[in-house]
Amino acid sequence: MRRIVREQRGSFAIPILYMVILLLSLQLLAFAVARYWVQVIREDIQTKLDMSSMASYPNLNLENLAETASVTLETAEAKKTFESVLAKQLEIDPVTLAPLPSSPVERLQIDKFKIYQSSEVPARLADGRMILHSPAIESQITVHIRLPFLDRNFPFTFHSVTDLPQTP
């Protein structure tokens, strides 16, 4: 009888080991899916930030283009256009910047919207890069992205420098 008990002593260890390996594998798979999902959302938000900056182009003031070969941008109108297009693309309320239910964004904060006019170029950006030849729009936002399967949100900062259309 002792020999039978001794031989069956480790029989529960193998299924438990398989269960532990299975649970760890499922957690690793869930982490990989979450990381991929966040990366896709980040790329999407970066593209939408760039497109929102480019949406300010219709606010170009071309009155002096023939004489000085330079363009200027109406800052207040350009910022209003930027905010409204960004709100529409990120599915947030344009007035309160509160997210709509279908939005992956938990909270949005516009950190910077600066237009470098022709007279301000060349200019050095905060990260050390230079704007050398043409006017540009620099924008920076902080977005808190919510994960649908976790009860947490994660802040990410997005930065965009968009050159204005070249003048002859």
Image: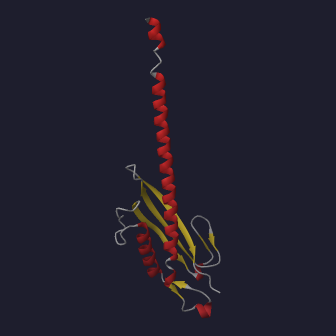
Quadrant of residue 19 in the image? top left
Q: Quadrant of the N terminus?
A: top left
Residue lying at 57% horizontally and 86% vertically, measured from the top left: 71
Up-down relation of residue 73 to residue 143 (above or below): below
How far across and down, in percent of the image, does residue 83 sit?
43, 73
Of residue 15 and residue 139, the one placed in the foreground of this image is 15
Q: Quadrant of the C terminus?
A: bottom right
Identify the colour scheme used: secondary structure
- Residue 30 vs 121, above or below: the answer is above
Quarter-wise, where is residue 146 in the image?
bottom left
Residue 133 point in image, percent of width and height: 65, 78
* Front residue of 118 and 162: 162
In the image, residue 20 lies at what x, y percent? 47, 31
Residue drawn at (56%, 73%) of the image: 162
Along the line of sight, which residue is nearer the eye, 58 or 20?
A: 20
Residue 114 vs 100, above or below: the answer is below
Q: Quadrant of residue 98?
A: bottom left
Q: Is residue 157 left or right of residue 87?
A: right
Q: Residue furthest bottom?
A: 67
Residue 163 in the image: state x and y as whole percent: 58, 76
> Which is more toward the observer, 99 or 62?
99
Q: Residue furthest top?
A: 1
Q: For the image shown, how many numbered marks are present on the structure?
A: 0
- Residue under the image location 47 percent in, 40 percent down: 26
> In percent of the image, x 52 and y 61: which residue is there?
43
